Amino acid sequence: MAELGLSRYQRNHVSSKKTLSAEEFLVVFGNSFKFLNVIRIRKAILLLIFGLIDKNHDGLISLS
């Protein structure tokens, strides 16, 4: 599901951009898992997940 949400996101945004900021991550995550009612997950928890994915801590997640 997340891959499908990410594909949709990329279609609607700059195609040369290969990263997601924290705010973009929140949008993609929310849209991808809307059917699970993840909107109820607190933003702080989602930002913690973002931080775990952002290995080099530059504030961006590489799409590769």
Image (cartoon, grey):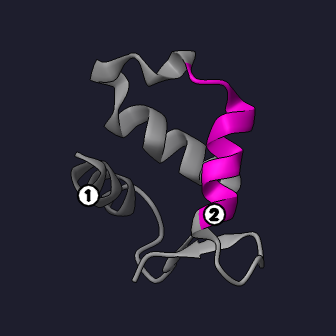
Left or right of 16 on screen, residue 56: right
Q: Could you tell me if residue 21 is visible in this image?
A: no
Residue 49 forms part of the magenta stretch: yes
Q: Nearer the viewer, residue 29 or 56?
A: 56
Q: Could you tell me if residue 31 is visible in this image?
A: yes
Query: Which stretch did the figure color magenta?
Result: 41-52
Left or right of 5 on screen, residue 53: right
Quarter that holds the C terminus: bottom left
Magenta part, dominant SS: helix
Q: Nearer the viewer, residue 30 or 11?
A: 30
Residue found 45% across the figure and 61% down from its top: 13
How far across and down, in percent of the image, does residue 59 sit? 75, 69
Give the residue type at disc 1.
Glu
Among the 4 quarters of the image, the one containing residue 10: bottom left
How far across and down, in percent of the image, does residue 46 sit? 62, 41
Among the 4 quarters of the image, the one containing residue 54: bottom right
Q: How many numbered marks, from 0 up? A: 2
Pointer 1 residue: 3
Q: Residues within 10 Å of mark 1 (few under 14, many from 20)?
A: few
Q: Which mark is residue 52?
A: 2
Give the residue type at disc 2.
Leu
As drawn, 59 above or below 56: above
Measure how far apart labels 2 and 1 are at the Cα level.
18 Å
